[in-house]
Image (spheres, rainbow, N blue to C red):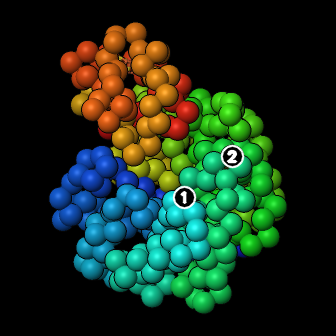
Amino acid sequence: MKKINLGKTSLSVSICGFGVLPMGPAQLALPVPEGAAIIRHALDHGINFLDTAQYYRTYPYILEALAGGSYGDVVICSKSLASDYDGMMDAVLEARESLDRDVIDIFLMHEVRSGQLAERAGAWQALIDARKQGLVRAIGLSTHHVDVVRDAAEMEDLDVVFPLINYAGLGIRCGDRFATASEMMDAIRLCHDAGKGVFSMKAFGGGTLTTHYQEALDYVFDADCIDAVMIGFGKISDVDDILSYLDGTMAADYQPDVSAKKVHVNQEDCEGCGACKNACPAGAIYWNENGLASVDHDKCLTCGYCSPVCPVRAVIMY
Ligand code: SF4
Ligand code: SF4
């Protein structure tokens, strides 16, 4: 698979990365050997860029996958929601220990929202220090927010940015409002032109755009300001689909079978705002015992109306 240098870093990554979240306890909860086999399958086919996070609890899958072969060129990105110095430094140290690596290739502030850069300044300083101490190679942030991506373009110390973008604009925010895909693309271009490495997330908008499979992939892979596209994989056939898309052997009318996928609310992200419940035409969303949204799969039509209205992308399909 084609590789590209991420911005001004010396990290050479495959243009398609492997998001490890779907196999973990928050989604499919695959047994570790099963998940590790999927990662190894991707590594064996040229995908060398892995994305994880402290909060995903997926380090064991990567550790086991890498123990099974010699994958010297693998690039691991992790991230933490920590907002203060000690929390972020602990997250870096935890990743080194859990992944059995002296240096983590990329470490990010996870999911930075509008206006949060100042309040997470301690965490950012920890990443700057971690890079100085040789604990990480490159630092940056992940975000769903256009204004944060614009700010990232001007952050001198920042090497990489990991923004959300898909052709439908699902989940893209700017301050308190929803924003468009073209606004985000413009912000990404600012980062790219400033020499930042850019890898994107949620090309399928959390799963709801999977029925427009090739259109969704064309949008991000054709963007010359996006270096690499991170795709979440939960089974080997998902990896094979991307490989065939990228090597040009995929039939023009190919659509993956998504009939077994269901709509879920990620309980760690849901803020209980009720927007999805109001948008649901089937009365399939209810308040669970924690006061958060849950989906009644006996009623759900998988129409997807709940997904675009969620301000935090908590509605996902897998
Ligand atoms: S997919 Fe449609 S039916 Fe299912 S919970 Fe969302 S809005 Fe309701
Ligand atoms: S729209 Fe999103 S944050 Fe709001 S209740 Fe629904 S799932 Fe939770």
Would you identify the image quadrant in which residue 68 lies?
bottom left
What amino acid type is highlighted by mark number 1? His
Would you identify the image quadrant in which residue 198 lies?
bottom right
Q: Which residue is mark 1?
A: 110
Say few, some or many: other residues with alpha carbon within 10 Å of mark 1 (under 14 / 14 to 19 / 20 or more): many
Do we see residue 309 in this rendering? Answer: yes
Instruction: Indicate which quadrant contains ligand 1.
Output: top left
Residue 97 x/y as whole percent = 37, 82
User: Is residue 11 shown above or below 162?
Assistant: below
Identified at 32% across, 22% down, the residue is: 286
Identified at 74% across, 73% down, the residue is: 157
Most extreme residue toward the top is 281
What amino acid type is highlighted by mark number 2? Ser
Say few, some or many: other residues with alpha carbon within 10 Å of mark 2 (under 14 / 14 to 19 / 20 or more): some
Question: Which label is found at residue 114?
Answer: 2
Residue 158 x/y as whole percent = 71, 68
Do we see residue 65 in this rendering? Answer: no
